[in-house]
Amino acid sequence: TMDNIYRPHLMTVDQIIDEAPGIKTFRLAFQDAGVREAFTYQPDQFCLLSAFGYGEAPFSLASSPTRQGFLECSIKEVGKVTSALHELRPGDSIGLRGPYGRGFPIDQMKGKHLIFVGGGIGMAPLRSLLWNCIDERPDFGKITLIYGARSTTDLVYKRDLATWTAMSDV
C-alpha cells in the first residue's frame, strides 16, 4: 500500500531483454492494480529495486511515463544485488520503492530544439525522456541523439535506436 514508504510495491517481471554483455532491461508490472493506477513519475526519476534476500539498489526508470501499464529498468551486473536481479526469470517477483529524484524539467524544454548526448548504460534516463518527447512530438523542435559506447556490442536499446533512426523527425 502507499501508506508505508518503506514497504516496497510488489512487481512481477514480465519480460527480460538482453541489451548488451552484462546488461538486461526488465519490464515490470505492478501486482496491485490500485498502485498501478496511482503510480506516476517523470523522466530521470529512479526507483529502489529489491532482490529479496539480497538487498535493494537504485536504478533509473528507463521507460517513459507516457507509456502506461509497465515500468522498465536497465541493469548492469556489477555486484551482489545486480547479480541476484540478473538471475530472475519472467514471472518472478521483486520489490520497488519510489519514484525518487526531481526529473528533467520537461516544461522548460517545450518549444525548443533538443540534443540528447549519452553513453553506454547512461542512456537509461535519456531513453525515458526521449520516448516522452517523441510521444509528445508536437511540443518540441528538432530532436537529435548523439549516443556512443565502447563498442557496437556495448550499445544498449538497439531496437529503439533502429526505430529512432527510421523516424524522419529525429
Image (cartoon, helix red, strand yellow):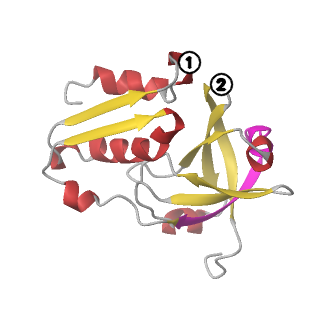
What residue sits right under mark 1 in the picture?
153
Q: Quadrant of the N terminus?
A: bottom right
> SS at mark 2?
loop
Residue drawn where x is 17% and y is 50% of the image:
139
Q: Which mark is residue 21?
A: 2
Work out which residue is located at the far top of the displayed protein and give it: 152
Can you give x and y, in whole percent of width and height, for residue 128 in the image? 42, 46
What is the CA distance from the residue labelled 2 to the residue labelled 1? 7 Å
Corner quadrant of residue 135: top left
Which element type, helix, strand or loop, lies under badge 1?
Answer: helix
> In which quadrant of the rendered view does residue 41 lie?
bottom left
Q: Is residue 160 magenta?
A: no
Q: Is residue 59 toward the left or the right of residue 83 in the image?
A: left
User: Residue 32 appears at what percent x and percent y?
Assistant: 64, 64
Q: Label 1 is placed on what type of residue?
A: Thr
- Judging depth in this view, the residue of 89 and 85 nearest the camera is 85
Neighbours of disc 2 within 10 Å: few (<14), some (14-19), many (20+): few
User: 158 above or below 102?
Assistant: above
Residue placed most toward the observer, 81 or 25: 81
Residue visible at 54% across and 49% down in the picture: 70
- Extreme residue toward the right, this view: 53
Measured as percent of width and height from the top left, residue 28 is found at 62, 48
The quarter of the picture where the C terminus appears is top left
Q: Splitting the image into 4 quarters, where does residue 147 fall?
A: top left
Label 2 with label 1: CB-CB less than 8 Å: yes
**In magenta segment, residue 86:** yes
The stretch in magenta equals 84-99
> Which amino acid is tagged 2?
Pro
Q: In this image, 7 relative to 123: left or right? A: right
